[in-house]
Amino acid sequence: MLLDWTSPAGSWDVLRLVRNRYGWAVNETDGDILLDQTSHGTQFVDTGVVGGHWLYYTVFIKAAGVWSRAATVSTLMPKNNGYTDLMYSLVPDYYKITIKDGNAVSDDSNTVNQDLHPFLSIFGFGFDIVRSFYDSNRYTNDAMRTHFGNIAKMAAQFGIHYESSTPAYLFRQRVRDAATLGRQKGTLEQIRSVISQTTGYDSDLRIGVNMMLSDDQATFDHPTYPNWDAGVNYASGERVKFGSYLYQAGTSGAYGQAQAPTGTSTSNAFWTTVSLSSDTTLLNSNGNIAGWEEVSFTAGVSPGTNAVEVGVGVQNPTNPSDNAGNALIVKNNNSGSATASMGVRSVAKISGQSAMDPAQPVLWGVPLPWISKSWDDAAFYEPGALVLYHGRAFRALSANFNTPPLFWTTYGSGGYGSGLYGGGEQYSSSWEPLSYDDRVQLCLSGYTQAYNGQQVPVYPFIEFYDSHGALICALYSDAVPSYTVLDSFTRKWIDWSSRTTDAGGLTWTEAVGQWTTGGYAGGSSYPTGTGRALATLPGHADGTVGVTFASSPSGSQKQGLVFRSQDSSNYWRAGRTGLHRIASGSVAATFAYSSAFADGDRITVAYSGPNIAVSKNGTQVLSITDSNLSTATGIGMVVE
């Protein structure tokens, strides 16, 4: 392979030629170093090549101790497919020899035609080139063999941003394994593979005590842009990080120290500061970003189109001097331009469906540990196993057998026969504590910032689903504790006059009759008598409430979820077949559902102003507008 180039102008110290099998070298050591010269030679013959492969050559110049990339070229080295020999074998023997006068064709004294084989090699080489390109095209979709110019396009199909500073071999690996890594998302194996394919180094990972994501893990890391490099010739539109800001190269590109970014919030002739820019790489056809979808908390108002985006060039909330971060941008752009409470959920509905498919939270939600088994000295535990020991939750750090998570040590004053005077708890190195009781502690947090000039309150929330994907409840942040109410009815409670909810600490009021709790399906509540019974909690005029129907009431009685209760005679009742407004103790209005509720179905009612929506297992079955009792605040349950 003969390479030639024009000698670089100006003064420089060393010219280096680097060959790479997978792409153009990103630095002066990324590949096989073929040539280091201080003279102004302009040619090099590379004899150590194998035919049938793309080769990538890069010229680096060292000046004043700094290496800079000066030139690149790629070529497909033709493979000898034997076409010259094939054509030669097909030529009649008459033309392969020079026949002496008077000789027959078969006489041994005839001489071989020395010009025929070299002549045929001209055409054979051409066929070899065509065949080599044909074979190369067969591997267009092979990330490890296709021309490197195709890799950026392949990466874009998987939502991977091409980074010019990433070594070609590592980037090819990342594209090749994109589908596999996507299926393994969130696992230790996937995280280890991503680290290896990004850095080229292996890593040792282990799960910590924190079951949820930390701040750095929960950031929107994609897209990530490389740091500006004076040795890279940037094309128009390429983005880099320099100092505390992001920049995008201008229409003419940028190269060298003289065309560096400003390092401040201002732009120059070569670079434009990127601030609060929208990145739509991960935007899907349903308007969701990486699984995040906008949701409305105002009944009767639907989210707008593409109201959630990934913003780049955003100020880091934990480091205000860093203006090159990424964040989720949420907009209230509903079609009616109504004032509404909007938010985002990390698990989105399936495209085209109006309700959450139960498979979505099962597949993409964060699995929460359910610890029901106590530690057993006869059991063998794998790493990650969860157990209860002395009423506390523990997780195995390593495989172990007959190793208690917690033990007591005693110590004395020293000396033979001395008395023991104390002791203390010690955790086994094979286990780690998750909590000081049988519950696993969880933490949900987030940073928010308003960029439209308005101070808009933002509250984190978390939705709980069961193992079948059915919504259990949604809990909101401490900023609105009065909205956080949950009672699982798993605690046995005889006197409801002092019963408080599991979450929120609100006290029940037995407005009519008496109630008790049972163990049905892990927790249930029902009246103690056969007459009318109503139990209420203090609530709000707007909100969302839900309950699961365990079993039907006896006889002709009706049961239902109560909301906007003014008193024991005036309230809304969401029953099994319809929504009823109770006025002065009688049914004043009835609204039928599109689908009735059966045992085990969960009913959820969202109400805001005059808008009321009823859902069955996450699917809406009724939506009405009615302003009656819109200022009443009580919630609860009734059998009547």
Image (spheres, helix red, strand yellow):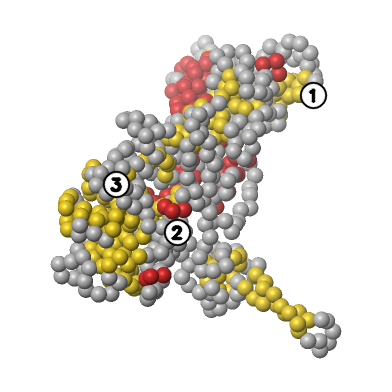
Which label sits in the foreground, 3 or 2? 3
Residue most extreme to the right: 415
Residue 152 is at least partly visible in this image: no
Write down the residue under mark 2.
504
Write down the residue under mark 1.
65
Q: Position of residue 344 (x, y in %)?
A: 42, 41
Q: Amino acid at mark 1?
A: Gly
Q: Residue at x 23, y 42 (%)?
A: 625
Asked whether, in this view, residue 61 is left or right of residue 148, the answer is right
Question: Could you say whether the residue bearing mark 3 is in a helix, strand or loop?
Answer: loop
Q: Position of residue 55 (x, y in %)?
A: 59, 27
Asked whether, in this view, residue 508 is left or right of residue 637, the answer is right
* Residue at mark 1 to residue at mark 3: CA–CA distance: 76 Å
Q: Amino acid at mark 3?
A: Ser
Write down the residue under mark 3.
630
Quadrant containing the C terminus is bottom left
Q: Residues within 10 Å of mark 3 (few under 14, many from 20)?
A: some
